[in-house]
Amino acid sequence: MPIPSLYIAAANPSLSPERLRLLSYFNRPSVRRRVAEHWNVPFDVLYRLAHDVNPEVRMAVGLNSRTPDSILKVLIIDPNPDVRYMMASSASTPYWALDILANDSCPFVQCRADRTLTRLRGEPVIYLSDTAPLAKARGS
């Protein structure tokens, strides 16, 4: 089967856990990412993909609504700040994880987690680009 076909096949909603497990070993990160996004992926496969060499695969694990907290705990301390940033950006990331990410070593991750928490609480989010109207209101 050609590579694009495997990529498309990995998104098939009727794929069995066994088939997803086989596809999760495929050498193309795009196919492994699709497996990590799948609603029917087994938890042991999610755990293995949470340790994948490719950060986009790990990000897909973090965005899967079925990913258990035990795996999310691995992803919020991922060595790649892009993975942590993605976790901090997602409204589906649990509050406890966002609280941890709000104290991340990377200031970009901290800021994004703070904004996500603020947004989830229904509070207004003020962006740096919003300072121009503030300056104009002050007569600057």
Image: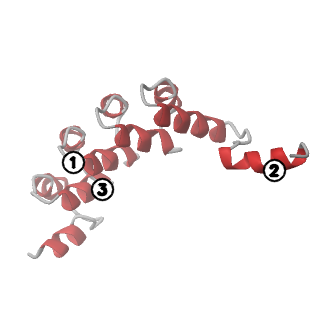
Residue drawn where x is 18% and y is 40% of the image? 48
Q: Is residue 86 left or right of residue 48?
A: right
- Local crowd size for mark 1, using a 10 Å CA cut-off: few (<14), some (14–19), many (≥20): some
Image coordinates of residue 43 in percent, x first then y, are: 24, 40
Q: Secondary structure at mark 2?
A: helix
Q: Position of residue 98 (x, y in %)?
A: 50, 31
- Residue type, label 2: Pro
- Rendering colour mode: secondary structure
Could you say which is closer to the camera, residue 8 or residue 114? 114
Residue bearing the label numbered 1: 54
Amino acid of disc 1? Asn
Please tell me whether mark 3 or mark 1 is closer to you in this view. Answer: 1
Q: Which mark is residue 133?
A: 2
At x 74%, y 42%, the residue is 124
Secondary structure at badge 1 equals: loop
Q: Quadrant of residue 46?
A: top left
Task: Report the number of discs.
Answer: 3
Look at the picture and state if 26 lies above or below 70. below
Residue at the spot 53% in from the left edge and 44% down from the top edge: 91
Give the spatial CA distance, label 1 vs label 2: 41 Å
Q: Which residue is mark 3?
A: 38
The mark that comes first in sequence, 3 or 1, is: 3
